[in-house]
Amino acid sequence: MEYGLVAGWLVASLALGLAGLPLAARLFQQFPDHGTAFALPLSLAVVGLVAYWTAYISLTLGLVIGLLVLVSLSAFSIRGLNRTEFDVHRMINPAIVFVLAFSFLVTVRAVDPGVHPSGGEKFLDFGLLKSLLRTSRLPPEDFWFASEPVRYYYGGHLVVALLAKLTFTEARYAYNLALAGFFGMLVTAAYGLAGAIAAERNRSARTAGVIAAFFVGFASNLETPARALLWALPDRATQSVADWFGVEIKGLAVSPAAFNYWDASRVIPGTVNEFPLFAWLNGDLHAHMMSTPFLLLVVALCFAYYRTPADALRRRRALIFGAMPLVTGILVVINTWSFPTAIGVGWLTLTFANENPATLFPRPIATQFPSDGQLSIRQEVMQTASAFAVAVVVLVMGMSWSLPFWFGAASGRAIGFLPDRSALGPLVLVYGGFLLVFVPYLLNYARSLGTQIREAILAAMVGLVAVAWLFDAAALAVFGPLLLVGWLVLAVRRNLEHPSDSVESIVVRGRQFTKSDSGGAETGVSPSVPAVGFETLLLVAGVGLILLVEFVYVRNNAAPGRFNTVFKTYAQVWILFGTAAGVIGAWVVDAHRQWWSSSDTLARHWRIAGYGLLTLVVISTAMYGALALTDHFTNEGGVKQVDNPTLDALEFVSTMHPTEAEAIRWLDNRTGQPNMVSVPGCGCNENEELWPYHWVNAPSSLTGIPTVAGWDHAGDYHSREAYFERVEDIETIYGGTPEQRARLLKKYNVRYIYVGPSERTAYDVAEFGKLRGVNVAVRLEIVTIYRVNRNQLPA
């Protein structure tokens, strides 16, 4: 085990967080921990964005300038900070959470550190990291599409490469250390954000943070307890229950010994339903995972704006037009799928914050969005429209901060509509744990809406069920009411909790009521204000994403239908829901304590029931982690691939593929990114071992040396036609005439020809040594690597 590297990476992470702490404290000055939980992702966002722009000159120079900019911003932020208001103990807690989460993931990865090709995108992720470490400037050459730049969102891998350079860590170790670092940042950000939201509602910040950290870092969906239930049920009932939930009777449903950690990620047919513990246990260093702490950083900025009073106009503008575009700019490059979500959360924040978002614009523009101070459909439309206008400005500014990506690495995708939708049973399994927390919470505050509004909600729910039945959209029946109630309680809170001085009345369904009205059933408006906060906004945002992907999806060649859309969207929903669940969990715990001695017996019983329900949710969603980690560390699941704990991502090559290990090491010792040719992983051959997700294109994926055509993923990012043209050219290179070979070797500027077991399986490989300009570079037991001298090739 490389304890020195672990300690070095941990110290570097904490040092970067400390460097960005003054800037975080300035942005999140109202948070209980003064923004400590977001100091590290904020620092990496600043360094990453600056490096992304300057690395087109030099990657190393970009790192240096990024660090200088971070230190300068923090030094400027120290001015004006009231250091006497800082609670050091609260600032230490997020650091402890990060160290614990980081150490947990290091322990998990040390058992199965390999970047093996099966069951994920490790070949893609490691290849991107190696390409960035090999290049001296951006953009890196595509290691699966030689001579062309990468057309993929590689910002997260760029951040890892910068950290590897900063700590002098080889890619083989940086891969797993980065996984631990991103996991630590995610759990810590959820802890800090949930705590800040809870504290604003006078609830326990620590309780909310711990519960959110659990839901985000350890909890799973209900697939595992459902299979356990099937196993425990009588045989006659098992099939009926399994059919309703859409669960196959296999794995844990057959026997505890048959549990497979993979099953819980494939619940809704035709989709991927990952949650963080599965993703990090599986071990991909993928974009949708690395973006999560930065997405929560954007959400934290939104919450900081949400709490900022109206008279602090300069601060509100700085948060929305200054900090938000910068962070969303780097988020685009890390994971483009998160960009719309970040803008959407910003739009909802502007919609439901107490202050009219139009005030952010100069006065001539602001007057185009008048506010009449009434809770009415017209006013809600105006509020939403002005919020949308501001969000569009943030979107354009965020795109401006990531312009090189849009003009270089981005690849266009078409939008599809009305895909296959989710059945009720699988949908309940995926989000049932959250529903058990959210539904009672919203029902409790829906009582504050008054009789008339509740009647309107009931009528709307009936309509939603009818539409859901008509379009076979179970999600609309399940989540539509949550969206409706959540939106309404947020709107009522905004208008009644902090009305402006000019607001003298509210209008509900055409009836006007003054501030002095007693409310109640007679007027239709309850005198109490729904005690909801930003956690409900996160709930609404997550529900909106779930409903959106039931009807709209992004077309791509990587997978059929909405497979990829649900995959990337649900990963974000889980983060939003998990943070909101932490705050709501704190409400349940605090309410339980409050009502324990209450004279209202019924209320006390309801609170105790809520406490018991939360306990049930925690236990059921923790079952997966207990089983999966037990298998992981005892090797029951067959994932352990090293004899001794290590963070070496390439250790498995020597043990599982010893015949090619030396050849790959030889290639890895080459400098720069010279092009090579090897068999493509495209399923073009009848031999399934040459298809993607197998040991194919290992030489390019594990070294970052570009091959003419690698996995067929490259065809999704560039073009299918160009990719398969290269596939045909590779076949000619290995089996064509000398003249054809020479022409194509020149065309793709090939420096090395790799002839290993996969190439011998795919082609009738001829002797390259007979071709002028091609000589043996290294000859091993079953691998020969030829060196090409382009100048000596036949004309």
Image: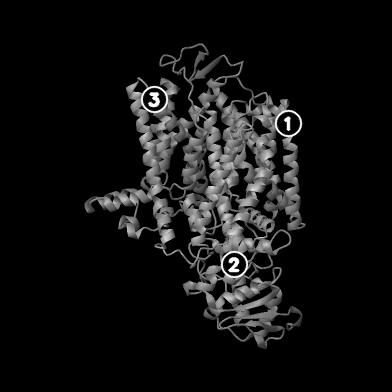
Residue 267: x and y in percent read 40, 52
First in sequence: mark 2 or mark 1? Answer: 1
Is label 2 in a helix, a strand or a loop?
Answer: helix
Label 1: few (<14), some (14–19) or many (≥20) C-alpha neighbours in 10 Å: few
Is label 1 in a helix, a strand or a loop?
Answer: loop
User: Are discs 2 and 1 less than 8 Å apart at CB?
Assistant: no
Mark 3: amino acid: Trp
Most extreme residue toward the top is: 516
Residue assigned mark 1: 80
Quarter of the image with the N terminus in it: bottom right
Q: Is residue 401 above or below residue 111?
A: above
First in sequence: mark 3 or mark 1? Answer: 1
Point 53% across, 52% down: residue: 103
Mark 2: amino acid: Ser
Residue assigned mark 2: 701
Q: Is residue 249 above or below residue 96?
A: below
Residue assigned mark 3: 595
Cα gap from disc 2 to disc 1, whole angstroms? 50 Å
Mark 1: amino acid: Gly
User: Are discs 3 and 1 less than 8 Å apart at CB?
Assistant: no
Is label 3 in a helix, a strand or a loop?
Answer: helix
